[in-house]
Amino acid sequence: MLKDVIKTGRRVFCATGLALVATAGAAMADWPEKAVTLIVPWSAGGGTDATARAVASELEEAFGQPFNVVNRTGGGGLVGHSAIANAKADGYTLGIITIESTMYAAQGLSGVTPDDFTYIGRFNADPIGINIAADAPYGDAKGLIGAMEEDPMSIAASGANRGGLSHLAWVGLLDKLGIPADQVNWVASDGSAPALQQLASGAIDVVSTSPAEAQSLVDAGEAKTVALISSERSSLYPDLPTTSEIFGTDWSPLPFRAVAGPKGIPDEVVSKVEAALKDITEDPEFISLMSSRGFSVAYQDAATFEQTVKSSAEGLTAAMKSAGLTQ
Amino acid sequence: MRIGDRLFGPLLAVFGLLVIWGANGLPKVPGVRFGADLLPMGIGIALVLFGVLILVAGLRVPAAFLDLDDWQGRGRDGFAALWAFVGLLLGIVLFDPLGFPLFGILFMAMMMALMGARWPVIAVVAPGFILLLYYVFSGLLRVALPAGPLGAILP
Amino acid sequence: MTFATLAEALTLVFQLQVLLAILGGAVYGLFIGALPGLTATMATALLVPLTFYMAPLPAIALIVSSTAMAITAGDIPGALLRIPGTPASAAYTEESYAMTRNGDAVRALSIGFFFSATGGLIGALVLLITGPALARLSLNFSSFEFFWLALLGLLTCALVSGANPVKGAVSLAIGLLIATVGLDVTSGQPRFTFGSIELSGGISFIPVMIGMFAFSEILRGLSNASTGDLPKASAESGKQRPYQGIWPLLKTYPFSLLRGTAIGSSLGALPGVGGDLAAWIAYGISARFSKTPEKFGKGHPEGLIEATSANNAGLSSAWIPALVFGIPGDAVTAIAVGVLYMKGVAPGPRLFVENPTMPTAIIMSFFVANLLLFPLGYVAIRCARMVLAVPRNVIVPMILVCCFLGSYAINNTLFGVGIMLVAGLIGYVMERNDFPIAPVILGLVLGPVLERNFIMSMQISRGNLMGFFDRPVACVLGIFVIGMIALTIFNSLRKLARSSDGGGGGDAQNAFKP
C-alpha cells in the first residue's frame, strides 16, 4: 500500500511539475487544495456506488485531500448526471458517469448530452448477460430465442425501467434477430434487484443484467446465465458464450463506469486525475477488490474514452431508433 | 388558515380534475394496457369524489367559509413564523454565496431575537450551535457544506 | 444449524475486535440517528471506506450495529421534536410525540428503546432458527404478492387517520400523488415534473417528512392554532428514570410485543417491501384488534410497543434474502452485501452450507447490537431529556436549522430545502383543517410499491386481472385483503347507519367517525 502511495505520489509530483511549467503559475497549480466532491448518479449500495467509493478512497490517498462521495439519485441517473454536467467547472466537483449519460438525449429527456462533460478516464466496463430461470424448458440462449420466435409475448423479460440500458440491450439483440421491439413483453422494473426476485419467484422468464448481479441466484440453483450480450468474452466469466458467437449478431452494448467533470474544467485537473486513475487501475489491490464483486477493470485514458463515448452514443441512438424507443 | 368544508370540497374537486387532465396527457406505451397514467387517473377520480363528499358534509353544518385568524394578535410570534419561512427560503439563494456558517448564524440570531431571546444568549448560542453543526457535518459526516467568506478565518 | 456452529460463531463474535466494532458502530449510529434528517443509509455508506481496512466479520458487525442503532435512535427526534427518522418510524411518530406532549417524554423514549431492542432480540433469535427456510419462502414472492401486501399497508391508513376517514383518505391520495412525480419506470418518461430535472428524480420522503411533521409543527406552535406550548418535561417526568414503568407495560401488552415481532420478522424478509411496511401494518393491526382503539394517537403505549418491536425485528430479517440470495431489500443491506463481496464472502446459499459460521455470526452480531441498545438507550434518554429543558426561544431556532440541514444533506441539494418548506406549508394547512399527516407519508412510501407491482403484474399476465389470484400465495393474500376491505366498509356503513338513527344527521362530521 505504502509503496503504491509513494509511486502515485511521484507520478502526481511529476504531473504537477509539468503542469506548473505549462500553466506558468496559474491559480490551479496546486489542485487540489481543498476537499473534492465526487457525484455518483446512482444510489448507495449499487455497483456504481461501490466502485466510486473505492476509487474515491484511492484518489484521496493519491492527492492527500478528501474526495467526498455524494449520491445524487433519481430519474434513472438523469439528476446526478445533470448535476455533474452543471457543476462549477473549477475541478472541485467531479463525478462518476455511466453509459446512461449517452442515452438521455435520444430518449427525449432534456438536460444531459454527451457534449456536456469533460471526460477524464474509464475504469470499468462489463457486458450485460441473459439470465433465465434454472428450470426453464429451454436450456440455452438458442432455445430461448427459439421460444421467442414462436410467441414473443410469452416470454416476459425485465431488468430495468423502459428505455434503460438493460431494456435496450435486450430489445436491441432481438431486433437484430428479427423480432421487433413492439412484440416484446418488457416488464419495467426499478433496477435489477426486483427483476431478479421476479425471476426467482417464477413470475418472469428473462432478466438482462450483468452476470455479477445474478451470481448469488445462479449459485443457489435458481437461475442461470446463458450468454453475454457482447462480441467479446469476459475475462471474469471466460466460460460464458457471447451472443455474437451464438447468433453471429454484431451488437455489443458495453456499460461503463468512468470519471468525468463538467465541460471546461482546467486541463491540469484532467491530466492529474487521469494519471492517478491509471495508477489506481494498475493497483493489484484495486483490481482484486473489483473482481471480488464481479467487476472487471478496464482503463481508458481521456482521449480514448471520449472516442468510446461518442461511438457508443451513436450506436445506441441508432439501436433505440430501430427499437422504437426514441421520442 | 381554516378553510370551511364548503370551500375545501370544491377546491379539492377542481384539483382532482387537474390531476385527471394531467394524467390524460401522459405518454402511452404501445402494448402496455396499464401504464403511467393509471395511478394518477385513479387518484384524480378519488380526489373529485372526496371533494364532493366533503362539500356535501359541509353543506349540512353551518361553518365559516374561510377563517384567517391564525396569527391575529400573536404579535412577535407572527413575525417569527414569517421569518422561519422567509429566512429559510432566502437560505436557498444565500446558502452558496454566504456559506453555511454565516447564513446559519444570521438566520438563527434573527429567529432567536424575534422569539424574545436576550442578546447575550443569542451571541453565545447562535454561533456556538452553528459552528458545532458545521464541524460535525463537514468534518465528521463529510457532508460538504459551503464555507463562504467565513471559511477564510475558520480553521 | 448445529450447536458446534453456534459455539464457533459465538467465539467469533466474542473477540475483542468484533465487540469493539459493534460498540463503535452503535455509538456512531446513535449519534447519526439522533440528528434529525440523517438516515441509516447515510450512516452505512460513510462506513464503507473504513471497512476496507477491516476483517470481514468486524466490518459487517460494524454495519449491523450502526444501522440497528441509527434506526432506533431515529425515534428520539421523532418523539421529542416530531421529526421521524425513517418512513417506518413515521407510523408511530404521532403516538410518541403525543406522549411527549402529555409530559411523558421519558416514557415514550423508554418504550421506543426497550421494545425496539426486545423486538430485535426476539427477531434475531427467530432468524437463527428459521433463517434459510424463511429466505426460501421469501423467494416465492413476486409482484402479485407484493401488490396485495402494499394494499394491506394502505388499509392501515384507515386506522391511522383518526376521527375522519374521508379526510384521511384525502391525505393518503395526496401522498400517493407526490409519489408519482418523477421519471416513470413504465414509460421511461417524466411524469408531473413540469420540465424540472430535479423533479424528474422524484420527491424524496425525508424533506417531506421533515416539512410536514417538524416545520409545520413550529408554525403551528407560533400561531393561534397551537393547542398548547411546545412539549415540556413535566415535573414528574423530570424525576422519572429511563425504563421506569416498562415492566407493567410488558405484563399488560405481551401480545403486542409478540405480534409486532412476528409481523416484523416475516414481512422484513421480503426484499424491498418489508422494512418500511412492517411498522405500519403492525400499528394498524394493533389498533384494529385493540380493546381501546379510541386511545390510539393520543399517547397510548399499545400501538407504539407493537410498531417499534416490528421495526427492529424486521431489520434483521431484511438481511436474510440478502445473505441467502444476494437480493438486497434496501440500500443498507445492499451496501452490506457489497462489503461482504469485497471481503471475499460471497452471499448465497453456499455460504450457509460451506461456511455456516459466518451467517450465524452475523445474526449473533445483531443479537449483541440489540443488547447494547439497552445501556446506550439509557444514556441517550438521559441526554435527550435535557433537550426538553431548553427554553422555547432557543430550541425552536435550533430545530429550524436542523430542518434546513437535514433536508439539504439527504441529497446535498438545496432543492430538498425547497421541498421541505413547501411540504411544511401544505402540512400546516392540512392539519389546521383536520387532515392527518401520517397517511401522506404512508402514501409516499407505498405509492411506488403499489403502482410498480401492479403494473409489473399486469404486464406479466398481459392485462388479465385474474392473474392476481393465479398463484397460490397471491390468492390467499388476495382473499384476506379483500375480506379486510369488506369488513372495514361494512363496519363504517353500520356506524353510519347507527349515527344517523341517533343523531338525526345533525353533525355530518360524526357520520364518518369509527
Image: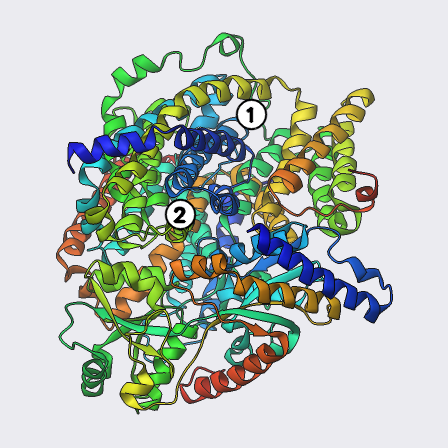
Is C62 situated above or below C154?
Answer: above
In this view, the residue in front, C91 or C437, is: C91
Instruction: Please state, as top left, top right, bottom left or bottom right, where the N terminus of chain C lies in the image.
Output: top left
Q: What is the spatial separation of the Cα atoms under label 2 and label 1, in whole angstroms?
A: 45 Å
Q: Position of residue C195 (x, y in %)?
A: 59, 69
Which amino acid, by three-letter code, is at mark 2?
A: Ala
Which mark sits nearer the N-terminus, 2 or 1? 1
> What residue appears at the point 33 percent right and 47 percent down from the top-left corner?
C154
User: Which image quadrant for residue C228?
Assistant: top right
> What residue appears at the point 14 percent right and 51 percent down from the top-left corner?
C476
Residue occupied by mark 2:
C336
Residue C306 appears in the figure: no
Which numbered marker is on residue C227? Answer: 1
Is C101 situated above or below C52?
Answer: above
Q: Position of residue A320 (x, y in %)?
A: 45, 84
Dots 2 and 1: beta carbons under 8 Å?
no
**Which chain is disc 2 placed on?**
C
Which numbered marker is on residue C44? Answer: none
Q: Position of residue A326 (x, y in %)?
A: 48, 83
In this image, B120 relative to C139: left or right?
right
Instruction: Please state, as top left, top right, bottom left or bottom right, where the C terminus of chain C lies in the image.
Output: top left
**Which chain is disc 1 placed on?**
C
